[in-house]
Image: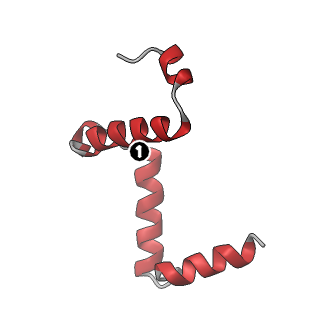
């Protein structure tokens, strides 16, 4: 295991590389990550709203454009 003191001594790019490595390990077996019920409930509600026509979706380019405009 890597000690916290070792992480503190890493450069920013080294820390990012470490995070990418850890995330790759977690993503390799998504079944080991338990999704909390509250998260499932939110996703179910959003899916229902979409299916009932109470919600719409944006493609990624449009979503990015709206986010950029809102944060200017």
Tally of marks: 1
Q: Secondary structure at mark 1?
A: helix
Rendered view: 43 above or below 62: above
Q: Does any portion of residue 35 appear in the rendered image?
A: yes
Rendered view: 42 above or below 38: below
Which quadrant holds the N terminus? Answer: top left
Residue 15 at x, y = what percent?
48, 35
Q: Which residue is mark 1?
A: 37
Rendered view: 65 above or below 5: below
- In the visual, does 41 lie left or right of 63? left
Number of other residues with Cα within 10 Å of mark 1, as a class: few under 14, some 14 to 19, many 20 or more:
few
Residue at x 48% of width, y 18% of height: 6
Residue 66 at x, y = what percent?
65, 79
Residue at x 56% of width, y 22% of height: 8
- In the visual, does 28 lie left or right of 7? left
Question: For residue 47, which quarter of the picture?
Answer: bottom left
Residue 70 at x, y = what percent?
74, 74
Residue 16 at x, y = what percent?
47, 41
- In the visual, does 12 lie left or right of 18? right
Q: Nearer the viewer, residue 55 or 70?
A: 70
Question: For residue 69, which quarter of the picture?
Answer: bottom right
Residue at x 48% of width, y 57% of height: 42
Question: For residue 17, which quarter of the picture?
Answer: top left
Q: Nearer the viewer, residue 24 or 30?
A: 24
Which quadrant holds the C terminus? Answer: bottom right
Q: How is the image coloured?
A: secondary structure
Q: Nearer the viewer, residue 48 or 56?
A: 56
Residue at x 47% of width, y 82% of height: 59
- In the visual, does 41 lie left or right of 64? left
């Amino acid at each position: 295991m890597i000690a916290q003191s070792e992480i503190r001594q890493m450069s920013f790019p080294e820390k990012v590389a470490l995070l990418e490595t850890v995330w790759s390990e977690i993503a390799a077996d998504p079944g080991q990550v338990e999704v909390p019920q509250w998260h499932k409930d939110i996703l179910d509600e959003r899916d229902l709203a979409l299916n009932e026509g109470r919600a719409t979706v944006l493609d990624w380019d449009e979503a990015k454009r709206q986010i950029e405009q809102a944060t200017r």
